[in-house]
Image: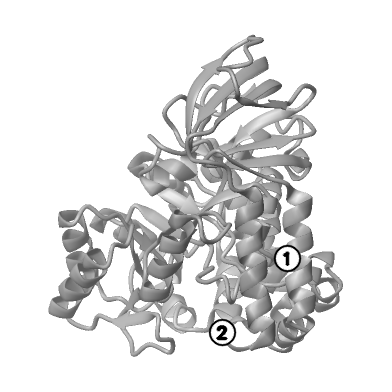
Amino acid sequence: MRNLACLVILAAFSVALHSQPNDSTLVIRGGTLVDVRSGSEIPNSVIVVHGERIQEVIKEGTSNGPPGAKIIDAKGKWIIPGLIDSHAHAESAEETPFGLYLANGVTTIRNPGGNTTVLRLTRDKLLRGELAGPRLFFSGQILDGMPPVQTWFLLVDTPERARSAVHFLADQGVDFVKVYNNVKEPELKVIIQTAKERGLPVSGHVPRTLTMTRAIELGMTRLEHIRITGKEMLSAEEAAAIDPLPVGKREPMLWQRFNLQSEKMRALVQLLAKSRVFLDPTLVTDEYFGASAKEAIEKDPNNQYWPKSDVDEALKYWNTGLFETPAELVPAAHEAFDKEQKFVGMCSEAGVRIIAGTDGPGIGVLVPGFALHREMELLAASGLSPLQALRAATSTAAEALGKEEQLGSVEPGKFADLVIVDADPLASVQNLRQIHLVVQGGKTYQPKILLDEARGRANQKQ
């Protein structure tokens, strides 16, 4: 109890330390502004922030803004929009060090599945400024067609229950609806129709009984992970044998058989582009489970931000259960990851709207905030340019949230969510890790202070 009280005091101190009055004016001048929409870089820019919104963006300016404004000298640095992690299962400050997101320039997260009540309460704390962390958008409970193994799933095994579940989630204030592996087509149709009536997009896994093509035809507009079922590409016999398997066996076996140059695969890529769906590959999670060595995860320096007991517990269950890859399939898992990256490159070249998500939080490469940088690096390694990878975590991610009028770029009227970095992010996506200062809603955050706080909390919990 004493440790918990200390953590609460530390969290309150963090908010007080970083908070500014809501009517304050901030001027960021001299930096090179990266316009993610046009791809241009604007040197010697001046950004005027009043309260939590961007008031003015002056190109090639020298203005100090109104009298009494706080001035931030960004000369020799670059300014980008706040980053968005489009797939982060962080729910509460008791379980996740939210400050790590801000320390890494992640000013918004999209949670596709969790306890609706806990998420609502956490979002309220963030909005009231009681908790320093990213903006939070969420789906609440995941809808699935089989009895759930977690409390944050809702069973929708009839069209009536599907309709009722969507109305329940909408009434609870969710931002979108997420479906899972075992939803059947009749229920999926009702989910999509009801969600549309309530003004909510439908996201999720492609159910195993369907193809990605059919899911898109029914109206799914946001696809989580790269879940191409065997039914889409293989013979009926092969699909029936592989599709029901746990993910650690299923994905290597499927991708081993997929031909990226086949007419079916090329047609699927073109459909994704033509239908304007958002694809959230979460490559970093597939790397974690399918293409990483346990020793590398165990020694990852990012683990210093978790209590050692949490790291040990995560290592105990790494690559087990649903994600366990049998030894004989490990080479196929590495091949699968390579093919997935090539598939993402094909999608990018075709114009598919790709967003950056991590499926964290976790240990190693999945530590909050750090994971999104790794995801962007993997997107770049898949063939996206640094600008395209940056868009996946800013402007395109904001579009996927339906919040492009408020987030995703540095423009007047939008939330003042900005990141100042020490090197040109369009020269290399790795330069995005060199964070100098983070601004969220007009409040400034020093990454070093946030990292020190997270490390201190981890040590306190040992």
Q: Where is residue 396 in the image (x, y as percent from the top left)?
A: 48, 40
Q: Quadrant of the C terminus?
A: bottom right
Looking at marks 2 and 1 on the same chain, the residue that comes earlier in the sequence is marked by 2
What residue is rendered at 56% in x and 65% in y? 359
Q: Distance between the residues labelled 2 and 1?
A: 30 Å
Amino acid type for the residue under numbered disc 2: Leu
Displayed quadrant of residue 154 = bottom left
Q: In which quarter of the image is the N terminus?
A: bottom right
What residue is rendered at 59% in x and 12% in y? 59
Residue named by callout 2: 322
The furthest residue to the front: 68
Q: Which of marks 2 and 1 is in front?
A: 1
Displayed quadrant of residue 412 = top left
* SS assignment at label 1: helix
Amino acid type for the residue under numbered disc 1: Ala
Q: For this rendering, which residue is in front, 3 or 232? A: 3
* SS assignment at label 2: helix
Q: In this view, does 9 lie to the left or right of 160?
A: right
Q: Position of residue 74 (x, y in %)?
A: 73, 26
Judge whether residue 233 can be spotted in this image: no
Q: Where is residue 283 in the image (x, y as percent from the top left)?
A: 62, 59
Q: How crowded is mark 1: few (under 14 residues within 10 Å), some or many (20 or more)?
A: many
Judge whether residue 37 can be spotted in this image: yes
Q: Residues within 10 Å of mark 2 (few under 14, many from 20)?
A: few
Displayed quadrant of residue 434 = top right
What residue is rendered at 69% in x and 79% in y? 329
Residue named by callout 1: 454
Label at residue 315: none
